[in-house]
Amino acid sequence: MKVLVIGGGAREHALCRSLSLDPDVTALHCAPGNAGIAEVAELHPVDQLDGDAVARLATELGAELVVVGPEAPLVAGVADAVRAVGIPVFGPSQEAALLEGSKAFAKDVMAGAGVPTARSYVCTTPEEIDEALDAFGAPYVVKDDGLAAGKGVVVTGDIEQARAHALACDRVVIEEYLDGPEVSLFAITDGTTVLPLQPAQDFKRALDGDEGPNTGGMGAYSPLPWADPKLVEEVLETVLQPTVDELRRRGTPFSGLLYAGLAITSRGVRVIEFNARFGDPETQVVLARLKTPLAGVLLNSANGTLADQAPLNWSDDAAVTVVVASHNYPDTPRTGDPIEGLDEVAAQDAPHAYVLHAGTKLDDGKVVSAGGRVLSVTATGTDLAQARERAYAAVGRIRLDGSQHRTDIARKAAEA
């Protein structure tokens, strides 16, 4: 099978790594990719928001499966353009991707499906914003209705900060605060059958102890030793399957990766948000544990034959990812700094630890930083403690001027 992956972050590197290990994949392409992906796939320049350009590239390459990684191309309708030329694609249609593209649409779908979530108000005027903030009280949860690359949410006890964020958005969703730990659960679906993956937990705040501003994610781990063993089954029955059924009932079937961000509250499981694609950095740890070859599963989703898929096979190992971010992330990150130590990790830490590139590029043959989150250092071990130890040992070999990373990823879970 010839596969084309669209995107250029650590999530796409994780996808390409898994696909490169699949014996059924005879040729692997990625557009636009990054410096790390170049080691496992052939790269092609493309405007990933231009559906016609992506469809042309897929046709030229003779791709038999296209995997759309990021949310922006999905919301822009890239999957539709590829489907229109008759190539199977893993990723929802533009209409179905509104589940991530609009928080208000997602709330409406959840209401129709009877999915448990936070009470919320959709606001478009300063008066509505003030009423909603007053109704819920602190801590305030304010979400930009549109795409914001994981950084459109403010959770704060400061009403002025909450109001300022709300006023900066065209349309905003203000909702009640959900207590309890957060869990990310991915599911692959063809619009009818829903196949859940293993749960993970990510770390959104920039600094240790969950301090600092929200980011796209500073690390993740899987499995979750503290979670109820029946969690996946419960979420499949109460969240994932009802949502997929509701979207099909509306005439906008969702095919691809459905990501549920969950809060395990004192009143039970509640949905914080849906995403329409693999999450970053959780993908890095979930795919590190998946033993079933990936391409066939994604193709079954694209072809509507997921009911024929054999049960997924998972490693008992734990996986931990630590994100190395550039200077000043998440504000205005510095780019263009050389990255050293990657060869040392490959020589001394493989196969238990490896580096997935997020924001990198080749400059005159050298790997340099090209984004806010630069690398995802991923490691596996017999338990979380060993996986953490290996991940941080590998992080310690990497040299990137001014870089930052959290030192407490998976610490509590490993010590529990």
Image (cartoon, rainbow, N blue to C red):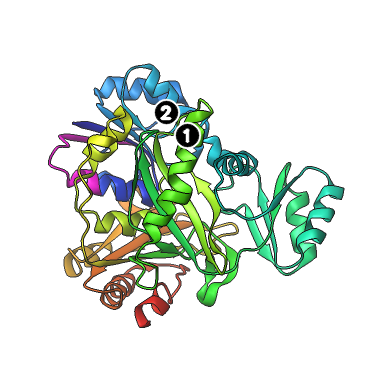
User: Residue 272 at what x, y percent from top left?
Assistant: 56, 55
Among the two numbered marks 2 and 1 on one chain, the one whose residue lies closer to the N terminus = 1
Write down the residue under mark 1: 74
Residue 279 part of the magenta segment: no
The image shows residue 211 at horizontal and vertical percentages of 58, 73
Q: Which residue is mark 2?
A: 79
Q: Is residue 261 left or right of residue 378?
A: right
User: Please, what secondary structure does the residue beneath circle 2 have?
Assistant: helix
Give the spatial CA distance, label 2 vs label 1.
6 Å
| Residue at image coords 26%, 24% | 61
In front of the other: 189 or 395: 189
Locate residue 85, reporting x and y percent: 35, 16
Circles 2 and 1 in contact, beta carbons < 8 Å = yes
Say the numbered circle drawn on residue 408: none
**Magenta span includes 29:** yes
| Residue in view at x 57 percent, y 65 percent | 267
Q: Residue furthest left?
A: 23
Number of marks in picture = 2
316 relative to 244 in the view: left or right: left
Q: Nearer the viewer, residue 323 or 259?
A: 259
| Residue 27 seen in render | yes
Report crowding for label 2: few under 14, some 14 to 19, many 20 or more residues within 10 A (C-alpha).
many
* Vertical comparison of 249 with 363: above or below: above
Residue kind at label 1, given as amino acid type = Leu
Which of the 4 image quadrants contains residue 393? bottom left
Q: Which residues are magenta?
A: 18-30
> Residue at left 12%, top 41%?
23
Q: Residue furthest bottom?
A: 415
Q: Position of residue 281 (x, y in %)?
A: 41, 57
* Rendered residue at 32%/48% (across/down): 13
Q: Amino acid at mark 2?
A: Ala
Q: Secondary structure at mark 1?
A: helix
